[in-house]
Image (cartoon, grey):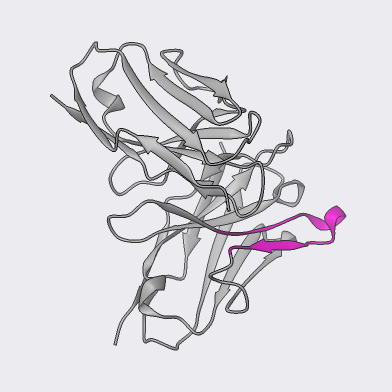
Amino acid sequence: DIQMTQSPSSLSASVGDRVTISCRASQGISNSLAWFQQKPGKGPKSLIYTASSLQRGVPSRFSGSGSGTEFTLTISSLQPEDFATYYCQQYNSYPLTFGGGTKVEIK
Amino acid sequence: DVQLVESGGGLVQPGGSLRLCCIGSGFTFSDYYMDWVRQAPGKGLEWVGRIRKKINSFTTEYAAYVKGRFTISRDDSKNSLFLQMNSLNTEDTAVYFCARVASMGGGYFDNWGQGTLVTVSS
């Protein structure tokens, strides 16, 4: 199975900050990487697919990059509604696997 | 708008069975692969399995930890996805989400439901 490792597991930031979350795959997955946002008590929301493509309706302050084993999610200017937990996920091979999550909290 | 609504969760004793349902609306259900993903209380997301569409013979994939215990099926005439769970144990306690796999290929999720809670306890 492909292991997905996210860092950090949590971070504190202020509105307007630039935030970067990293995701590392235990083996190469090309660009078969997605990012999700989840708020407490809600289902996940899809943000990014193929490592850098924005889902329809997702604000442009979200961006993704990377290929192979190293990936990054960037929020260019953190907004109040962005405080949530973020997950990466590989869909290159079965079983599909997720990172452990990064909780973005208010500083 | 695409909507996915799960139901069927509840309290079940260890060794018991439960059948979850996910109803899709706002899209042509039969055109999409569908998945189940779960989340134990306070934990991260964990993939359960996938069912492909009719043209792919409704074939399925499962995570190793559910093989032989869980079965995914679908009824496209009712826009419904099912998860039959047998031999449940306390580690299966989780919120279960259904997710739609994007039709553009690649196998990523583009829409999720709100989830249904399954609690396995005596």
| Magenta span includes B62 | yes
Residue B84 on image: x %, y %:
58, 75
Quadrant in the rendering for residue A100: top left
Q: Which residues are magenta?
A: B48-63
Describe residue A3's horizontal placement relative to residue A22 as left or right: right
Quadrant in the rendering for residue B15: bottom left
Q: Residue at x 61, y 73 (%)?
A: B67
Q: Residue at x 30, y 49 (%)?
A: A41
Describe residue A61's horizontal placement relative to residue A13 as left or right: right
Residue B77 on image: x %, y %:
74, 61
Residue B61 on image: x %, y %:
68, 61
Image vertical order of residue A37 relative to residue A80, above or below: below
Describe residue A70's horizontal placement relative to residue A5 as left or right: right
| Magenta span includes B55 | yes
Residue B112 on image: x %, y %:
51, 45
Image vertical order of residue B49 relative to residue A31, above or below: below
